[in-house]
Amino acid sequence: MKLKDITHISQETRERVYQRDSYDGWACCIYCGKPRGIEVHHFIERSRGGKGIEENLVCLCKGCHTKIHQGDTDLQNFIRSYLSEHYEGWNEESLIARKE
């Protein structure tokens, strides 16, 4: 299987992430709470082999998405905590696709 296939986010997965990260039925940024301009972000980036699975994805507004890609460590730590609270046994290493 190619890396792009493993890192791809299926529509079904995207919908589950929107549902998980919603408030009153609307997907919102998990960090600032904005309900507009929502984008799905890979916690472990696609370029590093981050899988396109729920456990590696969060909803962020465009502003927060930009911040995370600029290296905002507070936001990175917030996302880490958020995901670990939602998934028992959550482990960053399991989110990375490995060549076999």
Image (cartoon, grey):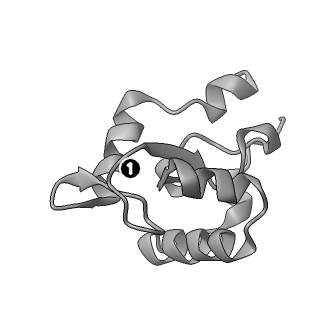
Q: Secondary structure at mark 1?
A: helix
**Residue receiving disc 1:** 17
Q: Quadrant of residue 72?
A: bottom right
Q: Is residue 54 above or below residue 13?
A: below
Q: Is residue 1 left or right of residue 47?
A: left
Q: Residue at x 17, y 54 (%)?
A: 25
Q: Is residue 56 above or below residue 49?
A: below
Judge by depth and name the residue closer to the eye, 94 or 63: 63
Q: Amino acid at mark 1?
A: Val
Q: Is residue 32 visible?
A: yes
Q: Quadrant of residue 14?
A: top left
Q: Residue at x 79, y 38 (%)?
A: 47
Q: Position of residue 13 (x, y in %)?
A: 40, 39
Judge by depth and name the residue closer to the eye, 91 or 38: 38
Q: How many marks?
A: 1
Q: Is residue 19 left or right of residue 80?
A: left
Q: Quadrant of the C terminus?
A: top right
Q: Position of residue 34 (x, y in %)?
A: 37, 59
Q: Is residue 56 visible?
A: no
Judge by depth and name the residue closer to the eye, 6 or 25: 25
Neighbor class of circle 1 (other Cα within 10 Å; few <14, some 14-19, many 20+) is many
Q: Residue at x 47, y 74 (%)?
A: 88
Q: Position of residue 16 (x, y in %)?
A: 33, 46
Judge by depth and name the residue closer to the eye, 51 or 39: 39
Q: Residue at x 60, y 52 (%)?
A: 65
